[in-house]
Image (spheres, rainbow, N blue to C red):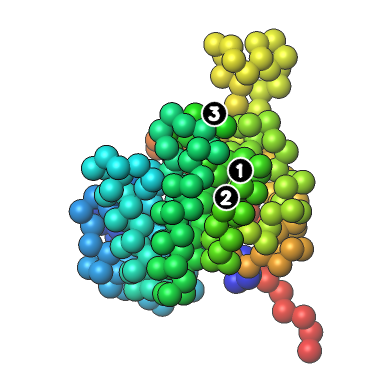
C-alpha cells in the first residue's frame, strides 16, 4: 500500500450502523474513512461509537483519517451552538478513533462579508485551535462556497485563496489548515493546479471530488443563466487530472488521505453510488502510481 497518501471515502457518522457500513465496503479496497456529521453529532456519542468502528477496522490497514463537522460554529442560534459543541467533542475524542484531525466549515456571520467575519472566526477558532493543539489534533477547513461569496453567505469563509491569506494571518496557528478539494475551486472558475504549488503546506486533508465544466453552456448562457454550467463529479468522471494533482501534492511533501466525497455525482448516484465511488477509488490509486513496489536492496 502507498501509505504516504491513502485513498478512502466519507462515511456518514449518523448511519444507523456505521461500523457495519464500514465492514461492507472495506473489501473494495478503501484505505481510510472520514466520519462526517452535518451541523451536529445527531445524538451520537463518539465515545460509544469508537470501539465499534475500531473493531470494524481490525485486521485491515485502513484508518479513520478525520472527523468532519459541517455547520456554522460562529453564530449564536441553538443549532450553531450545537455545531460548536460538536467541534469540541470531535477534538476531544478524535484520538479514540486513532485520528488526529477534525475538519469542517469555518462558519461566518450570516449575511456579512468575509472581512466582517474574521474577528469572530479568530475568536472561536483561536480557542478551538488551542484546545486541539493540547490534544495533538489539527483543524482543517473545507473550501466550499456553500453558495456564499465574498460579500455574503451563511456557512464558510474558507473558499477563496485571498480568504485563506486573511484567515491564516488572523490565526497563525501551525495546527490550522485546509481540507482542500479541486471541485470547489473549479466551481468558481479557479484553476486548481497553480494554487497547489502555493498552498500544499497548509493542506492537511483532501476531499476526492471533481467537477465537469460545461464550457459550451458558459459560452451560450454565461454562469448566471438558467442552464447549469458545472456539475460536481466523483473522481474519474470529471475534468480534473488527478495524476497531476497527486504529483503536485507528493512533490510538496503531502502525506495524508484523499477521501472521496460521494453523493454528488449527477450520473453515478442512487443504485450506482458505490459503483461510482469504487471506480473513483481505483482511478485515484492509478493516479497515485498504482501498487507500491519496493526498490531492490
- How much space separates mark 1 and mark 3, taking CA atoms? 12 Å
SS class of the residue under badge 2?
Answer: helix
The residue that label 3 is drawn on is 151
Give the residue displayed 71% in from the left and 74% down from the top.
293
Q: Earlier in the sequence, mark 2 or mark 3?
A: 3
Q: Nearer the viewer, residue 207 or 292?
A: 207
Give the residue displayed 42% in from the left and 37% down from the top.
109
Q: Picture coordinates of residue 187 (x, y %)?
A: 61, 32
Which residue is most to the bottom? Answer: 297
Quadrant for the N terminus in the image: bottom right
Whether label 1 touches label 2, CB < 8 Å: yes
Q: Residues within 10 Å of mark 2 (few under 14, many from 20)?
A: many
Q: Earlier in the sequence, mark 1 or mark 3?
A: 3
Q: Picture coordinates of residue 212 (x, y %)?
A: 63, 31
Q: How many marks?
A: 3
The residue that label 2 is drawn on is 167
Q: Residues within 10 Å of mark 3 (few under 14, many from 20)?
A: few
Tell me: residue 45, above or below residue 151. Answer: below
- How much space separates mark 1 and mark 2, taking CA atoms? 6 Å
Q: Is residue 166 toward the left or the right of residue 40 in the image?
A: right
Q: Picture coordinates of residue 201 (x, y %)?
A: 67, 61
Quadrant for the C terminus in the image: bottom right
Give the residue displayed 57% in from the left and 50% down from the top.
167
Tell me: residue 48, above or below residue 36. Answer: below
Q: Quadrant of residue 5?
A: bottom right
SS class of the residue under badge 1?
Answer: helix
- How much space separates mark 2 and mark 3, taking CA atoms? 16 Å
SS class of the residue under badge 3?
Answer: loop
Q: Quadrant of residue 255?
A: bottom right
The residue that label 1 is drawn on is 163
Q: Is residue 82 toward the left or the right of residue 270 in the image?
A: left
Amino acid at each position: 500500500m502507498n501509505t504516504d497518501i491513502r485513498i478512502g471515502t466519507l462515511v456518514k457518522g449518523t448511519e444507523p450502523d456505521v461500523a457495519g457500513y464500514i465492514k461492507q465496503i472495506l473489501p473494495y479496497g478503501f484505505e481510510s474513512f472520514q466520519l462526517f456529521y452535518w451541523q451536529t453529532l445527531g445524538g451520537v456519542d463518539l465515545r460509544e461509537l469508537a470501539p465499534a468502528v475500531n473493531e470494524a477496522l481490525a485486521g485491515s490497514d485502513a484508518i479513520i483519517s478525520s472527523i468532519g463537522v459541517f455547520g456554522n460554529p460562529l453564530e449564536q442560534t441553538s443549532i450553531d451552538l450545537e455545531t460548536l459543541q460538536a467541534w469540541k467533542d470531535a477534538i476531544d475524542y478524535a484520538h479514540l478513533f486513532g485520528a488526529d484531525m477534525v475538519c469542517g466549515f469555518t462558519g461566518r456571520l450570516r449575511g456579512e462579508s468575509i472581512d466582517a467575519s474574521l474577528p469572530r472566526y479568530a475568536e472561536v477558532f483561536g480557542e478551538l485551535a488551542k484546545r486541539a493543539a493540547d490534544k495533538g489534533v489539527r483543524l482543517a477547513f473545507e473550501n466550499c462556497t456553500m453558495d456564499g461569496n465574498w460579500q455574503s453567505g451563511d456557512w464558510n469563509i474558507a473558499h477563496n485563496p485571498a480568504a485563506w491569506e486573511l484567515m491564516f494571518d488572523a490565526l497563525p496557528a501551525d495546527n490550522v489548515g485546509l481540507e482542500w478539494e479541486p471541485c470547489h475551486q473549479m466551481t468558481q472558475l479557479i484553476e486548481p493546479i497553480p494554487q497547489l504549488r502555493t498552498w500544499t503546506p497548509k493542506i492537511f486533508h483532501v476531499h476526492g471530488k471533481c467537477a465537469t465544466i460545461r464550457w459550451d453552456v458558459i459560452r451560450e448562457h454565461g454562469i448566471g443563466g438558467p442552464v447549469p454550467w458545472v456539475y460536481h463529479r466523483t473522481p474519474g468522471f470529471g475534468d480534473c487530472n488527478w495524476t497531476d494533482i497527486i504529483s503536485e501534492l507528493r512533490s510538496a511533501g503531502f502525506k495524508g488521505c484523499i477521501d472521496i466525497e460521494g453523493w454528488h455525482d449527477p450520473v453515478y448516484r442512487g443504485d450506482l453510488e458505490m459503483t461510482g465511488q469504487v471506480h473513483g477509488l481505483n482511478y485515484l490509486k492509478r493516479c497515485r502510481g498504482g501498487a507500491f513496489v519496493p526498490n531492490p536492496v
